[in-house]
Image (cartoon, helix red, strand yellow):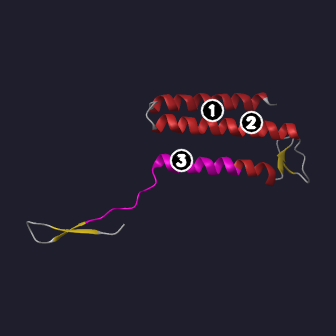
C-alpha cells in the first residue's frame, strides 16, 4: 500500500492520493475493552485471594475456599453480564435502539443491582 501518484492534465503537477490506515472504530474498541474485562474478571476469580466477611471488611484468604457451586454461580453471573454488555453494545451501535432506550435499560439494571445488593444481607 504505497502512495499513488498520477499526473494532472491541467497543471502538470502530480496528484498524490494517500490511503490512511484503517482506524479502530468506537464499536470495535468497546468490544475489545469488554472482552478484556470479561477475561480479567474470569481470571480474578482464581488469582485474587480477597473476600468480604460479615462485618464488610476485606479479608485475605489463604488457600482455595471456592467450591464448585460458588464457581458455577460466579461464572453464570459473568456470562450473563457479558451477554448483556455485548447485546446492549450491538443494539446501540447498529441503530436498533435509540440512546434513551439504552440509558433507561442501564438505569433499570443499576436499580436492580442496588436492590439485589441489599437483599444479600
Is any atom of residue 22 visible in this view? yes
> Where in the figure is residue 103, as x and y percent of width and height?
51, 32
Instruction: Depth check: give the residue in front, 1 or 79.
Output: 1
Residue in the image at 48% along x and 36% along y: 92
**Is 31 included in the stretch rendered in magenta?**
yes
Residue 80 on image: x %, y %: 68, 35
Question: Which residue bears the numbered disc 1?
Answer: 110
In the image, is 24 to the left or to the right of 31? left
Q: What SS does tag 2 mark? A: helix
Earlier-in-chain disc, 2 versus 3: 3
| First in sequence: mark 3 vs mark 1 | 3
Which label was assigned to residue 76?
2
Quarter-of-image position of residue 112: top right
Within 10 Å of disc 1 (Cα), the crowding (few <14, some 14-19, many 20+) is few
Say few, some or many: other residues with alpha carbon within 10 Å of mark 2 (under 14 / 14 to 19 / 20 or more). few
Say which element carries label 3: helix
Residue occupying image coordinates x 50% and y 49%: 28
Relative image position of residue 81 (x, y in whole percent): 66, 37
Is 50 in the magenta? Answer: no
Q: Which mark is residue 30?
A: 3
Point out the tag, 2 or 1, that comes first from the N-terminus: 2
Q: Residue furthest left?
A: 10
- Cα gap from disc 3 to disc 1, whole angstroms: 20 Å
Q: Secondary structure at mark 1?
A: helix
- Can you tell which quarter of the image residue 72 is in? top right
> Which residue is at 71% across, 48% downward?
41
The residue nearer to you, when weighing 43 against 119, is 43
Task: Estimate the x, y position of residue 46 in percent, counting from the top left.
Answer: 81, 51
- Say left or right for 47 vs 17: right
Q: Is 65 displayed left or right of 87 in the figure?
A: right
- Residue numbers of the magenta segment: 17-40
Amino acid at each position: 500500500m504505497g502512495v499513488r501518484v498520477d499526473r494532472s492534465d491541467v497543471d502538470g503537477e502530480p496528484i498524490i492520493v494517500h490511503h490512511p490506515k484503517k482506524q479502530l472504530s468506537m464499536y470495535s474498541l468497546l468490544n475489545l475493552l469488554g472482552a478484556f474485562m470479561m477475561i480479567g474478571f474470569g481470571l480474578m476469580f482464581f488469582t485474587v485471594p480477597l473476600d468480604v466477611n460479615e462485618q464488610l471488611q476485606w479479608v485475605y484468604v489463604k488457600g482455595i475456599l471456592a467450591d464448585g457451586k460458588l464457581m458455577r454461580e460466579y461464572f453464570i453471573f459473568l456470562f450473563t453480564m457479558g451477554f448483556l454488555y455485548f447485546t446492549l453494545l450491538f443494539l446501540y451501535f447498529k441503530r436498533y435502539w435509540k440512546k434513551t432506550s439504552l440509558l433507561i435499560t442501564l438505569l433499570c439494571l443499576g436499580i436492580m443491582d442496588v436492590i439485589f445488593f441489599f437483599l444479600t444481607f
